[in-house]
Image: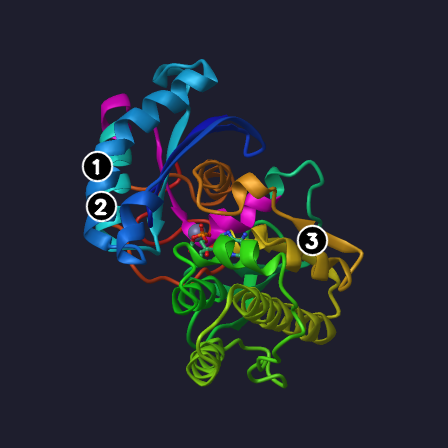
Amino acid sequence: MYILGIETSCDETAVAIVKNGQEVLSSIVYSQIQEHTPFGGVVPEIASRSHIEHLLPVYKEALRQANMTIDAIDAIAVTSKPGLMGALMTGVTFAKTLSYITQKPLIDVHHIYGHLIAAFLSDSKPTFPLLALIASGGHTTIVRMDDFYRFETIAKSIDDAAGEALDKGAKLLGLGFPGGPAIEKHAADGDAKAIVFPIAMPDQLNFSFSGLKTSLRTYLIKNPPLDETSRKNVAASFQEAIMDTLCTKLEKAMHKTHIDTLLVCGGVARNQCLRKKLANLSQHVFLTPLAYCTDNAAMIAAAGYYSYQKQGSAQLDMIPIAHAPVVSFSTDPDMTGSHAAS
Ligand code: KG4
Ligand code: ZN
């Protein structure tokens, strides 16, 4: 089954074609980073307008690279939740129009489900049951996955997400946007033990990163001005605190659930410091391929494949949802909501 995936939930305009949820035939991502950099973060209105401008060329390029025409596509999958409402609306409208014109099934995909399924685009396939850490700009969550369709949230951030903390930390350090890669680059030559930043709520499974941000701000106020060496040391220490927090909570979740298979996904999963630390936690760590950690449409097309098996296609009156937790698929054979088996 050939699925064309569309992703526009934040600041990447992406279209991909994936066969049977496994084989990526093309994956085109237009990153809007340069458009948002002058503002130090994603501007929702700019994101929506940029999606409108780039969706059609990105779609055409995805078909061209896969050497296919739309006639050969079996279904259209699109991120419908969660995300920036205006940005989601552009992709959903594009997908609905395509579905209507071509009379091909429309599949609505949860963005976080897409991140989880991205790990299965690796050659080494994760095995169930597993604990999945989703660490992105909008989410920091640990989910227990028993199969492709059943999951339970074990822990989540009560405030900022890990990627958000990196983005805000980089801004305080004057390192630019997006913060994760900028901090990682500066941290490479820094001393991660130079400053001890706190790990919040070490006894609990849930994450909290807003105190860490305050701690960084306080440090910077008390220690001006930063020379280049100190900036690198602060970046390395701040990154260390975030990655240690992620690993500490994962370890707790492993003890609690007696599950030692780990899946790690989302933009922060690109971080090499985190990837190294994870290797010490378990011998069964499944890391998402680097190309599919940050937002992309291959993960949406792949997730669309599994989603379609379970809940069929979405109706054309389906609407995007800005905030929505990731929940297990319905076990009701008649299915619920706007879905109907096709
Ligand atoms: O998954 P993603 O593309 O978007 C969301 O769904 O949020 O994740 C973006 C986040 C940003 O916060 C960015 O700073 C972070 O992922 N990120 C990284 C790295 N690359 C991207 N964080 C740490 N190290 C990286 N190499
Ligand atoms: Zn994402």
Given the image, on which type of amino acid does mark 2 rest?
Ser
In this rendering, position of residue 114 left or right of residue 102: right
Give the image location of residue 277, x and y in percent.
71, 62
**Mark 1 = which residue?**
52
Secondary structure beneath disc 2?
Answer: helix
Disc 1: residue Cβ within 8 A of ligand 1's nearest atom: no
State yes or no: discs 3 and 1 in contact (Cβ < 8 Å): no
**Amino acid type, callout 1:** Ile
Residue visible at 23% across and 40% down in the picture: 50
Q: Please state which of residues 317 and 225 is positioned toward the viewer in this rendering.
A: 225
Q: Is mark 3 within 8 Å of ligand 2?
A: no
Question: How far across and down, in percent of the image, does residue 250 sit?
Answer: 65, 69
Locate residue 195 relative to residue 279 in the image: left or right. Answer: left
Does residue 191 show up? Answer: yes
At 72% from the left and 54% from the top, the residue drawn is 285
Mark 3 vs 1, N-terminal side: 1
| For residue 90, above or below residue 154 | above
Q: CA distance from mark 1 to mark 2?
A: 6 Å
Residue 84 coordinates in the image, percent (x, y): 28, 55
Where residue 56 sits, quadrant-wise, is: top left
Q: Nearer the viewer, mark 3 or mark 1?
A: 1
Disc number at residue 48? 2
Magenta segment range?
Answer: 99-119
SS at mark 1? helix
Q: Who comes first in sequence, dot 3 or dot 2?
A: 2
| Disc number placed over residue 128 in the picture, else none | 3
Q: What predominant SS class does the magenta segment belong to?
A: helix
Per the model, the C-alpha gap separating discs 3 and 1 is: 39 Å
The quarter of the displayed image where residue 260 is located:
bottom right
Marks 1 and 2: CB-CB under 8 Å?
A: yes
On whether residue 178 falls in the magenta region, the answer is no
- Residue 187 in the image: x percent, y percent? 59, 60
